[in-house]
Amino acid sequence: MRHYAERIFVMYAGRVVESAPVDDLLDHPQHPYTQALLAAIPDAANATRLREVPAGEPPSLLHPPASCRFHPRCPHFMAGLCDVEDPPDFEPRRDHRSACWLHR
Ligand code: SF4
């Protein structure tokens, strides 16, 4: 994607959770789901080690989790916030948006 796109939009369960210019997103991923996606990319450096992946399965799109849709799988889950209020788009870096309460 680095060679084809100007901007990347990352979606989880039907919602855009992060967007940024391609280099900034790949070099500085902000949302826990994006970080998990990038950590799972196989390459020569990680071919022989197990990679951390979020527990669980992608949710049903007919009945997605309330509030942050990634909250049942997120390693940074904050009870009483992530499962109660839908995070808005924050801008933790210039022109780089992430829908995650970690950036409030
Ligand atoms: S809002 Fe909470 S559950 Fe959702 S990605 Fe951010 S820290 Fe994880």
Image (tube, rainbow, N blue to C red):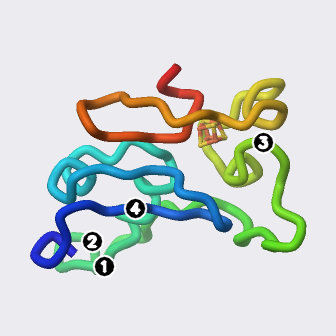
Q: Between residues 86 and 42, which one lies in front from this camera angle?
A: 86
Alpha carbon distance from label 1 to label 4: 21 Å
List the residue tagged with mark 2. Answer: 46
Q: Is residue 95 left or right of residue 53?
A: left
Which secondary structure, mark 4?
Answer: strand
Quarter of image, res 6: bottom left
> Residue 42's x, y, as percent?
30, 79
* Marks 3/1: CA–CA distance: 31 Å
Residue 23 lies, in percent from the top left, at 15, 55
Q: Residue at x 83, y 24 (%)?
A: 80
Q: Quadrant of ligand 1?
A: top right
Q: Do tag 4 and tag 2 residues touch (Cβ < 8 Å)?
A: no
User: Which residue occupies 37% across, 52% down?
Assistant: 19
- Determine the secondary structure under disc 1: loop
> According to the image, label 1 marks what residue?
42
Question: Would you name the residue on which mark 3 appears?
Answer: 67
Disc 3: residue Cβ within 8 A of ligand 1's nearest atom: yes
Task: Name the amino acid, label 1.
Answer: Pro
How dense is the environment of label 2, judged by Cα within 10 Å: few (below 14), some, or many (20 and up)?
few
The number of numbered discs placed on residues in the rendered structure image is: 4
Q: What numbered label is drawn on residue 88?
A: none
Q: CA distance from mark 3 to mark 4?
A: 19 Å
Badge nearest the viewer, 3 or 2: 3
In the image: residue 47, left or right of residue 17:
left
Question: Mark 3 or 1, which is nearer the eye?
Answer: 3
Q: Which residue is pictured at 49% across the width and 60% down the height?
A: 52
The answer to whether marks 2 and 1 mark residues whose Cβ atoms lie closer than 8 Å is yes
- The three-letter code of the residue at mark 2 reads Asn
* Mark 3 or 2, nearer chain start: 2
Amino acid type, residue under disc 4 in the picture: Phe
- Name the mark nearer the viewer: 4 or 2: 4
The residue carrying mark 4 is: 9
